[in-house]
Structure formats: structure tokens, C-alpha cells
Amino acid sequence: MSLKEKTMKLKNWAVIGATTKENRFGYKIPKKLKENDYNVFPINPKFEEVAGLKCYDNLSSIDKQIDVVDLVVNPKIGIKVMEEINKLGIKYVWLQPGTRSQEIRDFAAKNDIELVEDCIYASL
């Protein structure tokens, strides 16, 4: 089983960079994950709710174990989130197009975090 397939079997997903703008992937991804029976935790301190889901300020404010984090943010923000991901012991991260950087790849490799560089929206 590929890493992509393995992570898609996991149920608790956090989406970093969630937004209320319905034409953006930060909205489309949480909505589509929810429609496909995933437990979705949108993250953006600017919003109370995204796609009908409670929105969280950061990963640490979620009271459930997160299996996979989906990054939908600029790599400069993403690398800061990777530190929180590592601190919380989350081992799987999806990097959407536009979120990837060598710095994130290097951090993941050093900290035993597995990356899927693909679009979850297109994969569901």
C-alpha cells in the first residue's frame, strides 16, 4: 500500500489554511473531506466556522488525536506549522500544490514525518 493510500484510510484530518471563501481550496478541501466521512478540523484563527465545521486557532487547540495534516498555506507559514506537527507527534502531512518547499521536506526527513505531495481534493 502506498503512503497516499495509507493516509487516506486515516480518519482525523486537520486542514491548515481553511477559509470561508468558497472558491478556494481552503474551503473546498474541508468540505469534500467531510462529505467523504472524514473527521475534519479546519484551522485558521480568523474564523469560527468553515464549511459548517468548527474552526480551530491551531493544532494544539484540537482535543482529538490528528492523524493527517493537510497544508493549504504558503510554505513560509507551513514550516512554522511543521514545528507544531512535530511537537504533537503527528506523522503524516499532505502538501497541496503551492505549499511545498525544500525546507519543509528537510524538516520532515529530520523529524520522521512522512509527506504526501499531492492534492487531496483531486484524490477523493
Image (spheres, rainbow, N blue to C red):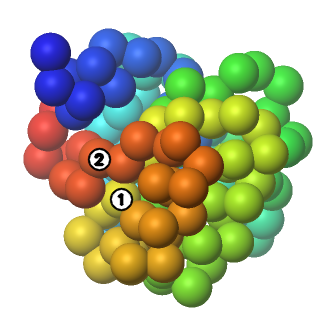
- Categorize mark 2 by other alpha carbons within 10 Å: few (<14), some (14-19), many (20+): some
Q: Residue furthest front?
A: 110
**In front here: 110 or 45?**
110
Tell me the distance, in whole angstroms, between the alpha carbons under discs 1 and 2.
6 Å
Tag 1: amino acid: Leu
Q: Which mark is residue 85?
A: none
The image quadrant of residue 38 is top left
The residue pinned by badge 1 equals 95
Q: Are marks 1 and 2 in contact (CB under 8 Å)?
A: yes
Visible in this render: residue 123? yes
Q: Left or right: where does residue 90 sit relative to residue 116? A: right
Q: Left or right: where does residue 67 sit relative to residue 59? A: left
**Rendered-image quadrant of the C terminus:** top left
Which residue does the image show at 22% across and 32% down from the upper left? 4
Residue 50 placed where, x, y %?
58, 51
Tag 2: amino acid: Val
The residue pinned by badge 2 equals 116
**In front here: 36 or 88?**
88
Visible in this render: residue 35? no
> In what element is the residue under mark 1?
strand
| Whether residue 20 is situated above or below residue 8 in the rendered picture | below
Give the mark nearer the N terminus: 1 vs 2: 1
